[in-house]
Amino acid sequence: MQLSEHTNQDKFRDVNYGPFYRMAQAIVIVVDVTNMDSLKQLDKRMSEVNFYFAKKKLRCFILGNKIDLQDRRVISESDVRKEFEKYNVDFMYGETSAKDGTGINEAFEALARVLVED
């Protein structure tokens, strides 16, 4: 499995990610559950994804990250599901904590299973 990172940071906004999307078999989108803006930024990301995956079967994995910060959480799983309904994309959802490792192995094992089954 080869992974490429695509960031939402402004300093990388002019990078052409087209070649990465064209080679991709799946996309993983990470949402910061403590930051409502990370959910709102999906419109731009999903328009890029839909453009490059228009003729391919899109396997989309959404990870709600920073679940270790429960006291700062502002995004629920239902918020993510509601947001993605408008994109008409099948996706899997999981929750992770990059800080303590919760859910990371499970997320990538699920991704690998789906890719192998195809």
Image (cartoon, helix red, strand yellow):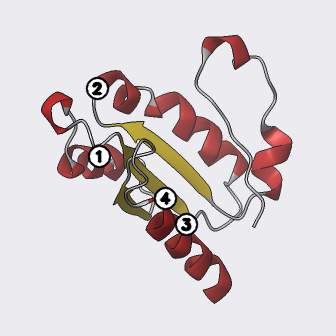
Residue occupying the point 29% across, 46% down: 80
Residues at badges 2 and 3 in contact (C-beta under 8 Å)?
Answer: no
Q: Judging from the image, what secondary structure is the residue with disc 2 in?
A: helix
- N-terminal label among 1 and 3: 1
Q: Residue furthest top?
A: 11
Q: Judging from the image, what secondary structure is the residue with disc 4 in?
A: strand
Tag 3 residue: 108
Per the model, the C-alpha gap separating discs 1 and 3 is: 19 Å
Per the model, the C-alpha gap separating discs 3 and 4 is: 10 Å
Tag 1 residue: 80
- N-terminal label among 2 and 3: 2
- N-terminal label among 3 and 4: 4
Mark in front: 3 vs 4: 3
Tag 2 residue: 36
Q: Residues within 10 Å of mark 3 (few under 14, many from 20)?
A: some
Under mark 2, the amino acid is Met
| Residue 30 appears left or right of 3 | left
